């Protein structure tokens, strides 16, 4: 029997005493990517940036790991979105030094940029979720054999 759409997106919540990785991993991705770009660990070579490669890689790996641990599709989307948003936060909040804080916040929270990052997150998060889910099924079938 195939799981419902709701089950695929959210999966079944588990009661835990420690914070769920589904909540902490996206926050850690955002903060980690933001800090990595801020201190120069991750860099952009220049030119027109349509996809921040390092941020996308962090988000995809984290989303695939969560999918491997039976995280839902929405969790993968949020994780990749958080990573890409970490780059955007660095670019707009720290990279536009000639503007006031208000102007930088308005640029960071601009709907067009947030939607563009969201579309990237939908595509990359879906691919990461598929990869993690397929890997989990392969490992599960190998363990059963």
Image (cartoon, helix red, strand yellow):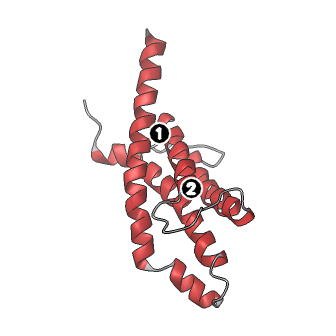
| Secondary structure state at the residue bearing disc 1 | helix
Q: Which mark is residue 55?
A: 2
Q: Is residue 39 above or below residue 25?
A: below
Extreme residue in the top direction: 145
Rendering coords of residue 97 (x, y %): 67, 83
Instruction: Give how far across and how far down residue 66 sits, in percent.
Output: 52, 41
* Nearer to me, 105 or 57: 57
- If the image is split into quadrants, where does the N terminus sit? top left
Sort mark 2 into few (<14), some (14-19) or many (20+) by Cα contacts within 10 Å.
many
Horizontally, residue 99 falls left or right of residue 112, namely right
From this view, report whether residue 100 is shown above or below residue 72. below
List the residue tagged with mark 1. 67
Mark in front: 2 vs 1: 2
Cα–Cα span, label 2 and label 1: 18 Å
Image disc number at residue 47: none
**Which residue is at a point 65% across and 63% down the rendered structure image?**
34
SS at badge 2: helix
The reply to whether residue 11 is in sight is no
First in sequence: mark 2 or mark 1?
Answer: 2
């Amino acid at each position: 029997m195939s799981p419902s759409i709701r089950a695929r997106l959210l999966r079944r919540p588990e009661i835990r005493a420690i914070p769920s990785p589904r909540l902490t991993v996206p926050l850690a991705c955002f903060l980690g990517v933001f800090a990595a770009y801020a201190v120069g660990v991750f860099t952009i070579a220049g030119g027109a940036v349509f996809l921040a490669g390092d941020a996308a890689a962090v988000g995809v790996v984290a989303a695939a790991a969560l999918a491997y641990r039976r995280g839902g599709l929405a969790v993968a989307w949020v994780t990749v979105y958080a990573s890409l948003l970490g780059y955007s936060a660095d670019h707009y909040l720290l990279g536009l030094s000639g503007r006031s804080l208000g102007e930088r916040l308005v640029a960071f929270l601009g709907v067009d940029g947030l939607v563009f990052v969201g579309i990237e997150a939908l595509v990359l998060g879906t691919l990461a979720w598929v990869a993690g889910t397929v890997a989990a099924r392969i490992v599960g079938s190998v363990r059963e054999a």
